[in-house]
Amino acid sequence: MNAETQRRVATLLDGIPIAMMAVDGSARMIGANQSAEALFGSGLLDRPFVTVVRHPAVVQAVDWVLWPDGHDAPPPDPTLPTPSDGTATLRASLAADGRDIAAEVTVSPLPAGIGRGALIAILDQSVAEEAEQMRRDFVANVSHELRTPLTAMIGFIETLRGPARNDAKARDRFLDIMEREANRMNRLVHDLLSLSRVQSEERRRPSAEVDLPGLLRSVMATMQHSADEAGVSFETEGLDIDLSLPGDADQLVQVFQNLIENAIKYGTSGGRVRIGLQRIAYEPLLRGPGWAIRVEDFGEGIDEMHLPRLTERFYRVDTHRSRAQGGTGLGLAIVKHIVNRHRGRLRITSRKGEGSRFTVILPETLQRG
């Protein structure tokens, strides 16, 4: 095809938001928009299509659209709408952008006014499939977390109605366990609602101003009783200043209550928890100045292999210990989403036997846009 035809094809493809490619009558590439180049790389023009997308079913669909009399039509996919005459639609797993993507591919003839050839539209459905898998995992995790205490409570109820009906000592013990399990389910429901609320607000930046040192001192006062019971003392650095930052006070209280509570629970052996506040003149990830709030314990620490997954929903380093201490597995996921809403960063460093440090970095100002 001549240069004018290629220009017209390029104009057609660039106006489409999904990956689009075009081939001429000999199945050589004559066009690819930016989305296609993002998936398959640059320098696609004038290459045989089979060297760009090597999936046999997609190549078969292109051959059939170009030469319907000499090639078999690809088998229809019952999960997809019936394509129009001369068009093929299929699902395929394609090697693109250094990974395998789940794609819906549609191959159709070029508009008659341009010339003989085919258009190939590739809709990347990987994000949708990953979201669906996350949804299934989430439902399975919630079901498991609720089923365990419910099964125990049902068993205790049956025992209290039967063998332990007149056993006052067993009744008191079972009721204590049932109360503990009911409280754990209540905490789980509360955290689920909190996570849902935080995620729904994540795209809305906070507009109020927060007295950050005062907020941290208030959280420490709230947690003092728990620290005393655990034999943990608080140390502070940099909290004796006046500082206001843009933020949602209620959500930031959630963040630091969670982090300080975890430091008390899992850092008890260290005997102290340090809360520090420090200005960062320039934080590259924030593209400007910020404030780092550190919550540090000196306990047994966390194996480094667990650190990348700590903010996943329901991920626990020690499942039995976490449940025994009343954890729901959602606390750090809530922290992550709140920090994201504030356009901040969460950093976690730890080594086994050396304690853990959780650092929240908040921007000094929130730029719009």
Image (tube, rainbow, N blue to C red):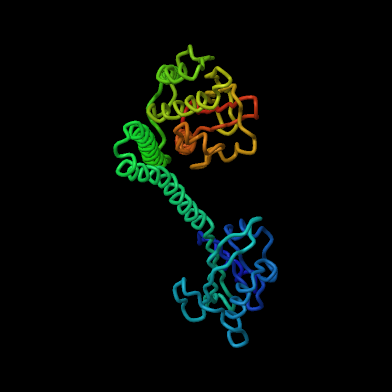
Locate the N terminus by quadrant. Answer: bottom right
Q: State the residue in front, 93 or 30.
A: 93
Residue at the (48%, 51%) spot, across then down: 137
Q: 71 above or below 152?
A: below
- Residue 83 is left or right of residue 200, and the answer is right
Residue at the (43%, 17%) spot, across then down: 224
Q: Where is residue 14 in the image (x, y as percent from the top left)?
A: 54, 61
Q: State the residue in front, 54 or 228.
A: 228
Residue 276 appears in view: no
Q: Position of residue 125 (x, y in %)?
A: 52, 60
Figure label count: 0
Residue at the outermost top position:
240
Q: Where is residue 185 in the image (x, y as percent from the top left)?
A: 38, 39
Q: 364 above or below 320?
A: above
Q: 12 above or below 112?
A: above
Q: Position of residue 266 (x, y in %)?
A: 54, 27
Task: Give the quarter of the image for residue 180.
Answer: top left
Q: State the residue in front, 31 or 144.
A: 144
Residue at the (54%, 19%) spot, across then down: 273
Task: Give the quarter of the image for residue 348.
Answer: top right
Residue at the outermost bottom position:
69
Residue at the (68%, 71%) spot, across then down: 50
Q: State the residue in front, 26 or 198.
A: 198
